[in-house]
Amino acid sequence: MRSRLLLLAIFPVTVLGIVLGTPFLFGDHPVRWESGSSLPKLVLDGAPEDTPAPSPSDSGTKSGRNVSAPRPTNALQVTKPWKPGMPQWGVQIYWEEEPRKRPADFIEKQAEKQAKYLIGLGANSVSISFPFFTASPTSDTLSAEAKTPSPERLRTVLHVFEKAGFRTTLRPVMDERALTPTDDWRGSIAPASDSAWFRSYGTFLAPYLAVAQAEQADTFVIATELNSMEGKPGWEKAVTAAEKIFKGEISYDANWDNYVSGRIAMPVNHLGVDAYFPVEVPDTASVKTLVDGWNTWLDKKSTGPLPKITVAEAGIGAMKGAYHAPGDFYARRAVDPDVQATWYTAVCQVVQERRMSGVYWWSIHFDDDPNTPPDDEHASRLDFAGRPLTERAVKTCFSSAYAGPGTP
């Protein structure tokens, strides 16, 4: 039964001003070209279920799949496949189609390469993020363009990860190339017609929801970081339409600033947070200092355990000064691998201490070779694949004794 999430936050005026101002001073959405929290007090309002009841054949299943059934034998196989109650130890794979469309056999082999790398990290979950497009901040038309992977090609990739035993998520993200000329971002759009915007979005989403259902994905993220659209009446109809196609978990990923500073009302099963909390400390800060910095942000929303929250994105640039603006995608300051590795270790500790449901590290580009060190002259400093210190921090995190949000 789908529960409605109502996220409430009451802030002193002074703190609210600081939080709302921080994104513009430091940058709150890390991948303005591609993608971008604290943790709320969740209130389940017990809204009546308006989706069809599961058929008898779905009894004991999730997304139509028996989660306790053995996975097929496969050379690429997650060591400990995810099950309900376990932490989601994951990575965000970001996929833009290349100008020269890769052949189908490359797509499958590349997915296998990424799966092998994630298995080596100890991951049990993967989220595939991909772009869709709008023409301007006020446009009410959304569309797939050349950089948007087709549903069929995404199905190929989902199939590889599913067969390998990963918990899988499909996650559309509004691209911002058409928004940056006016200093807008996906969280500030203001469509001329909300009803037209939701109709267009529903048309775009439908084939991707169908692919997620066909490949038995665990989660479909209905939207990501759309601050200005949160709470709009159109979401009820959009989510109900999505549930008729996709029987798994419907989620929404909130941006960290809106999460801690405002009221988020989205009719979804689950909330993720793209968590890029700035912590004003020197590059030499300890793990404990960074943990304290995260908890200071999180406590503004809710103290104690946060088992219903997933860190949908966490990351930071491997560079000097990154703690002040962890989501800064553009900066090219001096490389400092220790900054990134220490941050990853601290975030993992927060996830465990706050009993959160898991974390997804941002990010790996689908077409990249994850075994090759990033080209720091051109690549984002946020890239972590190929950085030994950060990879070691991820492996340590994913191999920890943390049993998951359901454990005491």
Image (cartoon, rainbow, N blue to C red):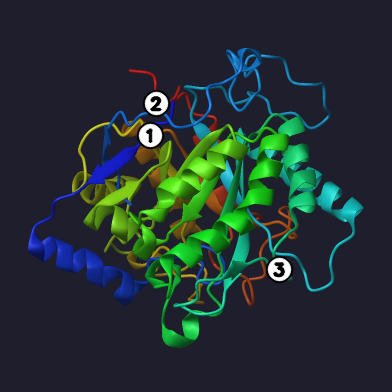
Picture quadrant where residue 345 is located: top left
Q: Residue at x 62, y 63 (%)?
A: 131
Q: Residue 356: which disc?
A: 1
| Foreground of the two, 42 or 247 | 247
In the rendered structure, which disc, 2 or 3, sits on the residue that comes first in sequence?
A: 3
Q: Residues within 10 Å of mark 2 (few under 14, many from 20)?
A: many
Q: Is residue 212 above or below residue 73?
A: below
Q: What residue did someone put label 2 on?
A: 405
What quarter of the picture does the N terminus occupy?
top left
Q: Please provide percent x and percent y for residue 285.
A: 32, 56
**Mark 2 residue element:** loop
Q: Quick check: marks 2 and 1 in contact, CB under 8 Å? A: yes
Q: Amino acid at mark 1?
A: Met
Q: In screen coordinates, is 306 left or right of 388?
A: left
Disc 1 is placed on an element classified as loop
Q: Amino acid under label 2?
A: Pro
Name above or below for residue 23 compared with residue 77.
below
In the depicted view, which residue is nearer to us: 327 or 165? 165
User: Visible in this render: residue 317?
Assistant: no
* Res. 155 image quadrant: top right
Label 1 CA crowd tier, 10 Å (few <14, some 14–19, many 20+): many
> What residue appears at the point 25 percent right and 53 percent down from the top-left corner?
260
From the top left corner, tell me how far across and down residue 47 is, in percent: 32, 31
Check disc 3 and report the residue beneath it.
Answer: 147
Mark 1 vs mark 3, foreground winner is 3
Dot placed on the residue nearer the N-terminal end, 1 or 3: 3
